[in-house]
Image (cartoon, rainbow, N blue to C red):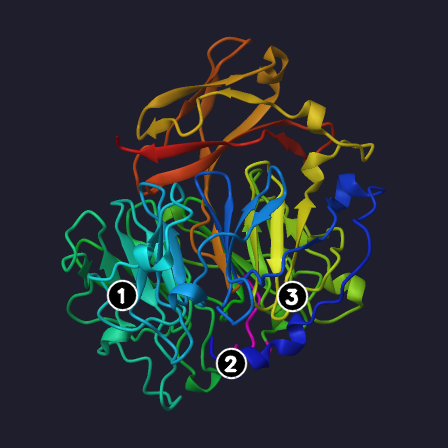
Amino acid sequence: MSRTRCSIFATLAMGLAGGAATTLAQSSVEGAWESQMSWGIRSVHLIMLRTGEVLVLDQPQTGQVDTALFNPTTGALTTSVPQQITDGRNVFCSGHSQTATGSILIVGGDDSPPGTVDVFLYDPSQPNQSWNARRLSSDSMPNDRWYPTCTTLGSGKILISGGRDDPPNQTCDWPDPVMPANRVLLFDITKAPGERYSEPETGSVPIHEFMFYPYMAVRSNGQVLYAGSNDHVEECNLPHNSYQLNISSGAWSLFGEYFRYGTSAAIYKPDGVVKIGTNQAGETGTGYCSDQARKSAWKQDSSSGQSTWTQLPCMNRERTAGQLLVFPDGKIGVFGGAYEGTDDQKKRPEWTDPDASPALDWTALAPGQTIRAYHSAAVLLPDARVLFAGGEIISTAEIFKPPYLFKADNSSAESLRPVITAPAANALVKYDTSFDITLNSNGDYADIEQVVLMRLGAATHSFDQDARRVPLEFTLKTINGPVQAAAPAHSHLAPPGYYMLFVLKQGDRAGIQFPSVARIVRVGAS
């Protein structure tokens, strides 16, 4: 985002440092925060890697760290890795998604001028490779992209959408679908350089009302749902329409109206999308949440073919630049972006169960140590904690332990969590097969409630482009195990790549399931 647009949110992103980690007095209800970490890097982009580490990226600036690796197991932050600024590169405001092999495709970004054709392939097994070496120098995009979204498809190809650089005149004759920068691209790593890009759109296409970080989701039928965007020019009064893109035919089709332009979105289950709030440029007044549009939340479950959005209960706080995060148990939470209320209220995330019946109100969670909003990011870690870091001028990070990591008496639930001993790390989970999950305690098998795959996250600007939760059907072979889980039937349910495999058992109170530490596995055809 350009410096001008950054300044719009500067007042929202001012961090106020707190003291020690959150008290454990109400941790069974509110969760708790660990002590804040001083990183010296503003975490604009957080990308989970198949190694279990987190790639941390910032805007290159002289004298500052712009690239780091965080190890959530040890708590160590490694900054002695190649820096973008050293190689004259800049992936600030880029899009990113995991490829089928677990490498990270990073496209576009840069901010001088906004937009670049650069494309990088980050291999987690080569953390010391230079950014120049990561750049696909003979394989640049045909047009600049600024704030693009990357979406891994069932085929393993990656859809690049949105990301137009700042228009010269913000008038209502844009975005124009005829302009190449407004059209979606397909990237195919299996093809030779120079042949990796194609335009899947054909014939008549709708006006692309998205420009920055559109919310795209692969549906179980293989089509790609556009469910709104991170930004919009309010004065244009374009219709609030969702569309589906048929990758095979190249045709867009109308998929119903959506509500408002959201500040974040997430895929909480196959064919299930949640959106919250409106962003700074969104419309005001909804007749919902007492006309406080930034408290609003909706879900869409299109598994039955329906395209309607259902209102969820209003959030406790108005939020701009807050990020939705999906938990292994199916709850959704929103981190950051609150800008009204006391400092304590601004530091609180909140969560709810989007499929609860009757609907549940959002529960305010424990306050962190810093107010975070624009240019912050959050990702789910393999041990089921949440890493939340950054902010416009904030170079700290903190880790949240959700209520499911505590017993009813507020003590740690670590001893009650199931422990996965098989499959092995990086094991292949093949589509439309079954596989066994072994636990280290036979007593845990009878209490297993869920087995889920969580795709490794890639978050920036209030949106995790790669997050995806895939519940798996399962049975017990015997009362003493193992768990026999059914892999996703096909790749549209779980695009190929690496996932965190969680097993959850019934907790010691209603509404709580204790998750295992995840085993990172590879999902694919072979």
Of 123 and 414, nearer the camera is 123
Of 207 and 189, nearer the camera is 189
Q: Is residue 132 visible?
A: yes
- Pointer 2: what residue? 3
Asked if 110 appears above or below 526 in the picture, the reply is: below
Element type at mark 2: helix
Q: Amino acid at mark 1?
A: Val
- Picture quadrant where residue 485 is located: top left
Q: Residue 384, percent across and down? A: 60, 38
- Classed neighbour count for the residue bearing mark 3: other residues with Cα under 10 Å, few (<14), some (14–19), many (≥20): many
Q: Earlier in the sequence, mark 2 or mark 3?
A: 2
Specify the segment rendered in magenta: 276-285
Front tag of 2 and 1: 2
- Pointer 3: what residue? 394
Quadrant (top left/top right/bottom left/bottom right) for the C terminus: top left
- Classed neighbour count for the residue bearing mark 1: other residues with Cα under 10 Å, few (<14), some (14–19), many (≥20): many
Q: Residue 356, percent across and down? A: 60, 44
**Residue 165 forms part of the magenta stretch:** no
Element type at mark 1: loop
Q: CA distance from mark 2 to mark 3?
A: 16 Å
Q: Main secondary structure of the magenta part?
A: loop
**Residue 283 forms part of the magenta stretch:** yes
Q: Earlier in the sequence, mark 1 or mark 3?
A: 1
- Pointer 1: what residue? 184
Of 125 and 293, nearer the camera is 125
Element type at mark 3: loop
The residue sitting at 55% across, 69% down in the picture is 63
The residue sitting at 83% across, 46% down in the picture is 23
Asked if residue 96 lies left or right of residue 71, the reply is left
Q: Amino acid at mark 2?
A: Arg
- Given contact means CB atoms under 8 Å apart, are the residues at marks 2 and 3 in contact? no
The residue sitting at 35% across, 34% down in the picture is 523
